[in-house]
Amino acid sequence: MRTAEATDHDLAHSYLGHPFGPPWEYGGTIVATLLRQVATLGDAAFLTTATADGETTTLSYRDVDRLSRRVGAWLRREARVGAGDVVALAPVNDARSVIGILGSLRAGCAVLLLSPADPVARLRPQVESAGAKVVLHPPAVSLDPSLTPVVIPDPDTLADPAEGEADAPVQPGADAFLIGTSGSTAASKLVAQSHYNVVANAAALRSHHRIRPGERILGCLPIHHVNGLHFTVLGPLAAGAHVLLAHAFDPFGYPRLLERFRPRIASVVPSLLEALTHTWRSPRLPGDFGYFVSAAAPLTAQTAQEVSRRLGVRVLQGYGLTETTNFSTTVPTDVSPDTYRRLVLEADIPSIGAAMPGNEVAVLLEDGRVAEPGQVGELCMRGHNVMSRYAGNAAATAEAFRHGWFHSQDMGFAVRDPDDDRPYFVITGRSKNIAKVRGETVSLEEMERALRALPGVRDAACVCLPHRFLGDEIVAAVVFAPGERPDVGSALRASFATTVVPRRVLSLDAIPRTATGKILRPRLAEQVAAHLDAPLP
């Protein structure tokens, strides 16, 4: 007899009642997807990388096939890895890293993605937990010697595999990636993404954005994160597109990349759009540019308005988690001007869009019932892009798949637009980023949005500290514009009860964030505690 946990797990991985497999095959594995593109596109450009000084290098689909086969054979020979093993890799946005990832997959391994900027104290537990056989990195990355790191060799110097030496056999359900979560919880969990998850997500991106072979996509987000990896590299691979992978975002060099490369779609985060609209003095996008896709951090209506006013294009906000491979929702490409205005440009909180193909999204109440439109609950997802598990953490996996859905811990609501029959979704905050001040529940994200909307405030974040009498106390950390110091307390009292408004406001030079714009809440709490000489929450 099947357990309730097993049933919940199966339901969380079904789409429209169908489990993994027929009629949705999606192409099997990542390597099989690459080989199909080589057979049909061959010498067409796949990957152009751009260095910090603007120098570019382009590889065709055939080049990537040849070079990744060499790296896969080198790994099997030198590192003695094979099907089912784990290779750790700390990539940057360069060709060597992309080839290293694909080569590891061709060796039959799962790839544990590491952040090259993380300290060894954070990297070592991930490497040990995953049981990685080898730790790889490109020449541009330096890792602590105690990890015994190995530089990915220049694939042009490697020999071709021996005649008849094939890629290691891998099934679609096998692990493709292990990626640490970057959420607000202190202990990161390792998310296991299968080949099936990856190709299902890639098929959804291709369908939603109508990406055709040869179309150009510009990405600059780091590929050790799911957004950079899947939207910028693996999604375009499955679509036969041409990717420009910038080393990083440079607000002064980015316009030149847009003009030179002429992409139809560009992948960004809100902070990059804000920098672009502030620094690009005479903006002019290529005539065939379509839109920006923004994710990883909340988009404000003000930012969307500035992009519309100064650049004349839309920002399609998306939402997803490492646990859902990449995107669960995105604003549809065919959204009407009126609906876009109501749900994005004029909304208090811009919508994250509608469900992507291959997965279902719902707002659930605590008892598992679906919330009514406008009623706040937890955003939950199920479908073919939902991770297989938290590696080595059965208890966390079971907790995440309650009621046959993956539970995101993000709070929000569904909204119906009068001109669109698709349910759209809005995120109001993270369930764990909640303070209880004098018994009143306060969303830290809601207060942060109010702070960032104030004139003279460049950035802001809130920290919840324990208080002997209040229960929780909220402390505001604010980055003020030069020469500005608005009355934060008075402004917040217009939207929040006086009893919950922060009594202490700290001026910081910068809010600590990840490379994709998420607030590093544990680090922020440490900074605030140091300033206040207060205990950590």
Image (cartoon, helix red, strand yellow):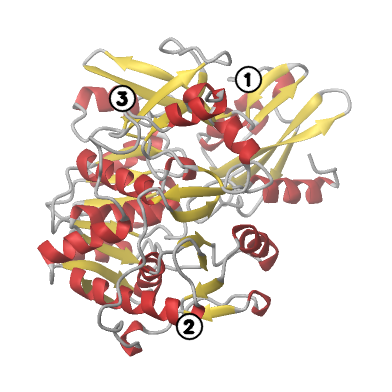
Residue 351 versus residue 64: which sits nearer the camera? 64
**Disc 3 residue type?**
Leu
Q: What element carries label 1?
A: loop
Number of the label disc, if any, that sits on residue 496: 1
Q: Which residue is drawn at 39% across and 44% down?
A: 326
Q: In which quarter of the image is residue 241?
A: bottom left
Q: Is residue 450 above or below residue 244?
A: above
Comparing labels 2 and 3, the label whose residue is closer to the camera: 2
Residue 400 versus residue 451: which sits nearer the camera? 400
Q: Residue at x 37, y 17 (%)?
A: 415
Number of residues whose C-alpha sits closer than 10 Å to that of mark 1, classed few (under 14), some (14–19) or many (20 or more):
some
**Mark 1 or 3, nearer chain start:** 3
Provide the residue designation for mark 2.
Answer: 78
Comparing labels 1 and 3, the label whose residue is closer to the camera: 3
Number of the label disc, if any, that sits on residue 16: 3
Marks 2 and 3, how far apart in space?
A: 45 Å
